[in-house]
Image: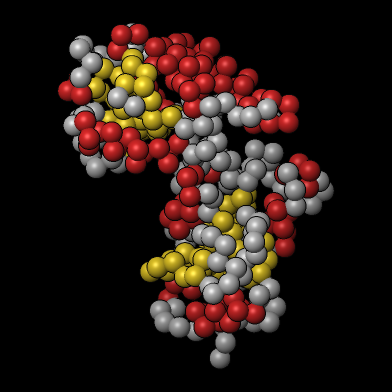
Amino acid sequence: MSLLKLETAIWQISGGPSSRSYADQFLKYGVSLIGPGDAGPWKPERSDDAFQGSVVRRFANEMKVDDIILLRTGLSSISALGIVASDYLYLNQFDEVNGWDLQHARRIRWCKLPDEYKFDTQVFGGNPSRFSRILDDNIRFYVEQFLNSPPTDWQDAPLPELPEEESSLDEIPKCLEDIVGQALDLTSMYLDQQNFGDLPTEDEMVVHFVVPFFQAFGWSPESIAVKWKYIDVALFHALPRTPAHCQFVIEAKRIGAGVEGALEQAKGYMVNLGIQGDVIVTDGIRYRMYSGQNDFEPIAYANLVRLKRSATEFFERIKQS
């Protein structure tokens, strides 16, 4: 007998662009997340304008417990299927996910597919919304078959524990007060393309933010190289500027593009040049560090416009000794 009732709705949700994805958070914590969340919790009396459109309202109000949700990865592919396990929640734990404010949440019992499943046609449309209801008969047939196929234990499995909410940084380091103030002033201006124009280039962010940021932590001009051997910024713990003396390889991305996408390019430079240091990827506002000695595992993070206590770990690691 089918587990899919006639009244059960099917939804699709995106886990973000490939360069700045947050789909792993969905699966790790048993959630689906939508932004913008900084405007506060959704309530029936609040206008769609407060949330930049109707998506948050539909996510919070129209999706029901036991509905089906698909984790979309493209125009016609999915990586997981889930069952909605809670009413609407507003979770501050997700106020900073790779730079996204995603506090609007639902608990989901996800089943991750062994491989992405691609439908034969663009079942989500040519330009799918980041969240929407799906009425396609092919998808409904697929979901029904999936729910009736083993294993089925995931359908009532316990939900993963949610992460604890991280506190904001108590006090901004004095050396960063001007830079953080500038970041707070300019970030919203940069993103207002109607009044500002095109987003700043990577090089512009390096000039206005990245170099001053590292100078604030004691790195002298001679230890900061820009476009050294094609690397956006390289920090040297000693002279001469050689691969053996390079402590950090820093790759920059345009603001909003997703700094995590710069890791592979930085790794390529390190391998080709024989550098033994660590990698930092940044857009001038967000900084993520990866360990060159530990298979490029992420080890520290800071967002200048949303500083958390954990940012102190990043600050300690980049101080010039």
Q: Residue at x 49, y 73 (%)?
A: 155
* Nearer the observer, 65 or 202: 202
- 141 w.r.t. 123: above or below: below
On the image, the x and y values in percent for residue 105 come to 60, 53
* Nearer the observer, 118 or 302: 118
- 249 w.r.t. 35: above or below: above
On the image, the x and y values in percent for residue 57 come to 73, 54
Quadrant position of residue 271: top left
Is residue 65 among the parts visible in the rendering? no
Looking at the rendered image, the quarter that the N terminus falls into is bottom right
What's the colour scheme?
A: secondary structure
- Lateral position of residue 312 relative to residue 297, left or right: right
On the image, the x and y values in percent for residue 41 come to 69, 45
* Nearer the observer, 274 or 297: 274
Q: Residue at x 72, y 44 (%)?
A: 51
- Lateral position of residue 1 relative to residue 211, left or right: right
- Lateral position of residue 201 relative to residue 265, left or right: right
On the image, the x and y values in percent for residue 319 come to 32, 17
Q: Residue at x 68, y 31 (%)?
A: 193
